[in-house]
Amino acid sequence: MRFYTYQHRHYCGIDLHTKMMYVCILDRQAQILVHKNIPCQQEAFLRLIGPYREDLVVGVECIFSWYWLADLCAREQITFVLGHALYMKFIHGGKTKNDRLDSEKLARVLLGGNFPQAYVYPPNYRAIRDLLRRRTYLVRLRGEIQGHISITNYQYNLPPFEKHIGKKGNRQHIIERFGDPHVRLNVETDITVMDQLHGQITTLENYIIRHAKRFDPRTFYRLKSVPGIGDVLALTILYEVQDIERFPTVQQFCSYCRLVKCEHASAGKKLGHGGARIGNSHLKWAFCEAAVLFLRQSQRAKDYVARLSQKHGKGKALSILAHKIGRAVYFLMKRNDAFDEDYFFRS
């Protein structure tokens, strides 16, 4: 965990919401200079911090509405620090909790050098990353609708579909299976939504791929040299990582990708594992998908997982392979190198 430890003349803690923001500004002696609730407006914020802008740092807990404030501070050349929400349990542990107290706690933790940092994603690539995440949501929604069609088919004990209905051309004669007009309308609605989602997902993929070729085409194609990583997984890794240099070690990278378990111990005794929600869930999904697809394309990967399964079981063996792929991707991006299967299985 990284903490913000730089010293400044003024420290500003903000309890941010969608419409209002409670601002607390401290000096180096921890004296409160400003403690006020203002609307979430750029002019109001700049007017409030105006007398204290000299050597000011702004700290905000990471919630969904931080984009505009981070961009404003960047334009105004004000130091901005984003706080990791899962490491800020001290805010919720007090006997009394409100916006006024929360903003003061943020400012005092920032002053003390104990402010847990989250990554401030650059605004130039933030919109494309969010677009890619939206594409993932639409794909999962399409999968849920496809599952509903299959459930409806089994409810009436009809024969299984001969072809995979995930493809648009294989859904043409599904409605004819059902005689009840209400059921037909239900299934027809699902098919219509799936067709619309399919077209929109394809449009998003093409747009993101074109943008990725302008962003970092060489890394994009190097990622695709890994068996099992295609366009979508390469895009996910590329935009979720953004800059591999922010991870000094491969262990930190794998921890961020949720590919390792964090051990809890006290007095020399192991107390289990924790922190499963801390990290990037999109990278966790990408590397787990890559491990499954790797098995389809590599006989050596099948033999490797088979050996691990005898000792650890199939599930843990796949997790070990996903971790191994994550380490390979880290060094691939760090060294600007292509994937080498012989070197991958050498150990």
Image (tube, rainbow, N blue to C red):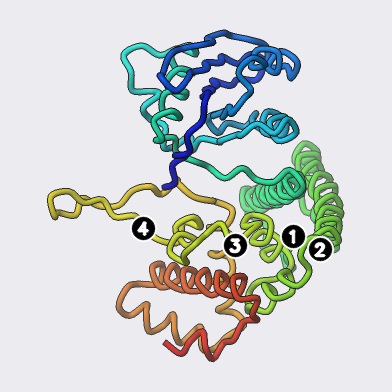
**45 or 50, nearer to the observer:** 50
Work out whether 21 lies above or below 235: above
SS for dot 1: loop
| Horizontal side, residue 127 vs residue 252: left or right | right
Give the residue type that dot 3 points to. Answer: Ile
Which is nearer the N-term, disc 4 or disc 1? Answer: 1
Expressed as whole percent of the image width and height from the top left, the position of residue 240 reads 63, 54
SS for dot 2: helix
Q: Nearer the viewer, mark 4 or mark 2?
A: 4
SS for dot 4: loop
Q: Nearer the viewer, mark 4 or mark 1?
A: 4
Expressed as whole percent of the image width and height from the top left, the position of residue 145 reads 70, 47
Expressed as whole percent of the image width and height from the top left, the position of residue 214 reads 84, 62
Give the residue type that dot 1 points to. Answer: Gly
Query: Is residue 160 something that shows in the picture?
Result: yes
Determine the CA span between mark 2 and mark 1: 7 Å
Determine the CA span between mark 4 and mark 1: 35 Å
